[in-house]
Image (spheres, rainbow, N blue to C red):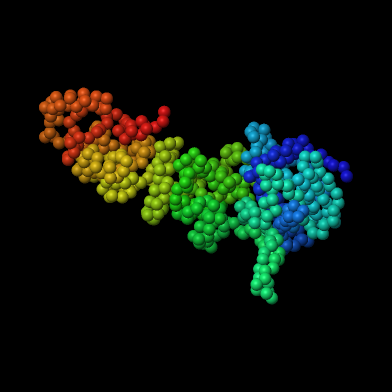
Amino acid sequence: MAKKEFQAESKQLLDMMINSIYSQREVFLRELISNASDAIDKIYYKALTDDSLSFDQSNYYIKLATDKESRTLKVTDTGIGMSKEELEDNLGTIARSGSLAFKKENEKKDGHDIIGQFGVGFYSAFMVADVVTVISKEIGSEEAYKWESSGADGYTIEPYPKDEVGTEIILKVKENTEDEKYDSFLEEQELKEIIKKYSDFIRYPIKMDVSVTKPKEDDENEEEEYIEEQIINSMVPIWKKNKNELTTEDYDNFYMEKHYGYDKPLKHLHINVDGTVRYNAILYIPESLPYDYYSKEYEKGLELYSNGVLIMDKCADLLPDYFAFIKGMVDSEDLSLNISREMLQHNRQLKIIEKNIQKKIKNQLESLLKNEREKYETFYKSFGRQLKFGVYSDFGSNKDVLKDLLLFYSSKEKKMVTLEEYVSRMPEDQKYIYYASGESIERIEKLPQTEMVTDKGYEILFFTDEVDEFAIRMLMNYDGKEFKSVASGDLGIEEDENQDTEAEEHDHEEIFAYMKKALSDKVKDVRVSRRLKTHPVCFSSDGDVTVEMEKILNSMPD
Ligand code: ADP
Ligand code: MG
């Protein structure tokens, strides 16, 4: 039988697939299953619009079967099927928009990582198979056909007997090589996991014949092996379920099943939006810090689904940096399965979703702060620094989003307080929001500089995190009240009229001059201080940069 050539474009794509990175190859199954699901959708639609057809949900399924001996993996569906022409057109050419866009993408950069991230279709089967056979019978047709290809050298089509309408795709799984293992694609357990990972929420049942052992009925001591047909996927996505039907445990399980983290989530958000852009999302605020969180290795992002099919593991565009700790997923019917990473960046729908999500997270954190203070403080222990970094690296509106989520230790309350709480307690004559920086609360409490402010009855915020002071500088003020370090030269506190500082400076001229000389490379000046009560001496700074900030700046690598 004469072989037909693939189009030149298809050949290129094939080449790329075959040489793709091993770890990404498992997505071929997602592709085959999503095609099967599409094909069932089509027959479903036809049944809805054609009275001569009936649609019985139970007749429609996707089924996987493996045979280790012949090294084959078979994916069967009861979908609409393909005619001879459709087999040629759909599987012999890559003229569809998604693939073309993908190809263009690939011209720009090394395309290997794209394969793992996006739907690239039927061709991905060649990532794991030497030979791909498609046997299909179209609805309403008497004949069925077999399409077969072993990759770049083209394909054959011939009539082939098949009783049921639908499609069967048979992969002859590649042999293991020294550094690449393909055997896992013949293992039931591995296949189950891939299905759970990528296709759990496909609407139709994904069945698989699984061999199980159980005690023999007539002899309890003997085990027998038999084949059991199991449904692998859960079919209804948790995010499409009604919130009222779900318990916290359901959400916690989903968190673990998805490996979003190894802790228990502190709080979940279930979002269903049916506006101009439709989407569902399940988001989590984790309880504890991922070990690599404040390192370069940490990658933010949410899983992105297009109508139930996973298209990206970590879509970074969905989260602002200051909410990088949020875990979870977004599913939208308005996104194409074949959308590329770069297309996503400019995608209008995605931008709307991002904005929307950001607002919801902010509201959730605020309500946690208001109603479940203890939980919020647990969260803040892990991710407060992130929020402060967010204020510090202010782009546009970060400050407004974040300023009411900040907590600092209060000298007065002896616990974490918000800026709003601080300001609400300020006596009328207090001009500034005072803060003191230091390594720890204990150390700051001993700082001589705090005495005068405390004596005045004013509250001081303790800054123990390096980023604190830098963040607050970006914030500039809260509710019109400026921040003031207790170590700064002018504290804005009325000094005692009866004390004559100048006269005192004059009286001690000699010793001050001597001290200045002795500390010549360490201090700029030695002066009389009015803020000391029980301590003999303290440091203060004149300019914009406080002593603590100076320490941090000096410790930074150039
Ligand atoms: P896409 O799904 O984005 O269209 P694919 O490469 O995955 O691209 O599939 C190409 C086409 O082949 C599909 O659009 C569909 O028409 C056809 N096809 C693939 N698999 C099946 C199947 N199991 N049943 C029916 N048609 C299929
Ligand atoms: Mg497809």
> Residue 88's spot in the image, x, y percent?
80, 45
Asked if residue 498 can be seen in this view, the reply is: yes
> Residue 68's spot in the image, x, y percent?
73, 55
Identified at 75% across, 52% down, the residue is: 71
Q: Quadrant of the N terminus?
A: top right
Identified at 40% across, 52% down, the residue is: 378
Identified at 63% across, 33% down, the residue is: 109
Is residue 458 found left or right of 224 in the rendered image?
left
Asked if residue 195 can be seen in this view, the reply is: no
Q: How many marks?
A: 0
> Residue 252's spot in the image, x, y percent?
51, 57
Furthest toward the right, the residue is 1
Viewer-nearest residue: 204 or 445: 445
> Residue 417's spot in the image, x, y percent?
32, 48
Identified at 27% across, 27% down, the residue is: 522
Quarter of the rendering containing residue 154: top right
Viewer-nearest residue: 472 or 231: 231
Viewer-nearest residue: 44 or 216: 216
Is residue 102 found left or right of 89 in the rendered image?
left
Height in image: 77 above or below 489? below
Height in image: 191 above or below 511? below
Height in image: 53 above or below 90? below
Quarter of the rendering containing residue 106: top right
Is residue 331 found left or right of 46 in the rendered image?
left
Quarter of the rendering containing residue 428: top left
Q: Quadrant of the C terminus?
A: top left
